[in-house]
Amino acid sequence: MAFFGLFGNKTKQETLDKGLEKSNTSVLSKISHAIAGRSTIDDDVLDDLEEALITSDVGVETTLRIIERIQARVKRDKYVGTSELQRMLVEETCALLAENDSNSDQPSSADTQSPYVIMVVGVNGVGKTTTIGKLAYMYKQAGKKVYLGAADTFRAAAVEQLCIWGERVGVPVIKQQQGSDPASVAFDTLQSAKANGADVVLIDTAGRLHNKINLMHELTKIKNVMQKVVPGAPHDVMLVLDGSTGQNAFEQARQFTAATQVSSLAITKLDGTAKGGVVLGISDQFKIPVRYIGLGEQMTDLQPFNAEQFVKTLLHN
């Protein structure tokens, strides 16, 4: 089930416009500087555009792919003025992301799996628990029965925060004492969810990158225990990244994808940063669908990611 229509397209677009305002202003000023005083798209313009994209946190590899596509387009179309560069940039960036199959407004297969289990991973401070709360709200608004599992037992504040979200949204939270075995919490959560006919289960996990080996073992143990209750669980391993950290988000993505099989991404805190270009680079480089973007503190400020809509909002005047 798609969630685009939940709050109305106008509200959604307005939220996207506001959330990407800083990033939009920053990247457009750099692009304007790149083409200032130029009439045609030549090597100098493309060099300056390359610098503009890299310094907007798009990432070197993705930037080079975009520049190569524009170069081919200019060669094919012969004479192309700088007035057309922005439109060309939007079109080629959209085409690049579409090739990665990241342009999806389908949040999950929650309509075909019951319960549908999402294990949420990410370091502390990226907005992981808040994202879980917002997802719970989104699913509940779609008529789903939701259970939350507080398997981040390493940090007491994480359990408390998840319980607050559970109360706010009106969904049950399964928890144990601080320091309990996270896999045990996940097991209890799935047992309770299954017994009570839940549609969706969101499992919070510890957000520490002590090292890849320990992280891998912990997440693998949680997965194995969950599969004893719900075969095939988790159906989605969602990595939450803080978009405001720019290139550090790339590094976190590398470490988590090396430690576990991440199947979707949620990129948060885009409303308070000019580093929105990081979404383009992460979507392109990791070939993992960006499922959601966080654009504010309200429950409705977590939006399904649509690549074309995002690119047009980021790169258009």
Image: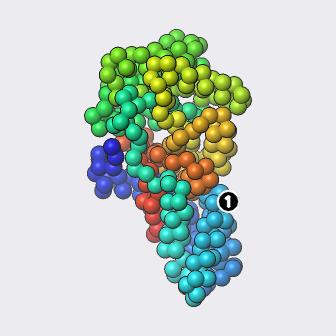
Image location (x, y in percent) of residue 179: 59, 13
Secondary element at tag 1: helix
Horizontal side of residue 314 vs 9, given as left or right? right
Q: Amino acid at mark 1?
A: Glu
Horizontal side of residue 135 vs 38, given as left or right? left
Horizontal side of residue 58 vs 84, given as left or right? right
Mark yes or no: residue 17 visible: yes
> Splitting the image into 4 quarters, where does residue 163 fall?
top left
Mark yes or no: residue 21 visible: no
- Identify which residue is drawn at 38% across, 27% down: 115
Between 296 and 177, the one nearer to me in the picture: 177
- Identify which residue is drawn at 46% across, 68% down: 316
Q: Can you say whether 217 is above or below 33 in the image?
A: above
Q: Can you say whether 148 is above or below 31 in the image?
A: above
Image location (x, y in percent) of residue 23: 53, 58
Q: Can you say whether 266 is above or below 118 in the image?
A: below
Q: Give the residue pinned by disc 1.
A: 61
Colouring style: rainbow
Image location (x, y in percent) of residue 8: 28, 51
Image location (x, y in percent) of residue 199: 34, 29
Between 200 and 139, the one nearer to me in the picture: 200
Q: Can you say whether 84 is above or below 228 in the image?
A: below
Quadrant of the rendering where the N terminus is positioned: top left
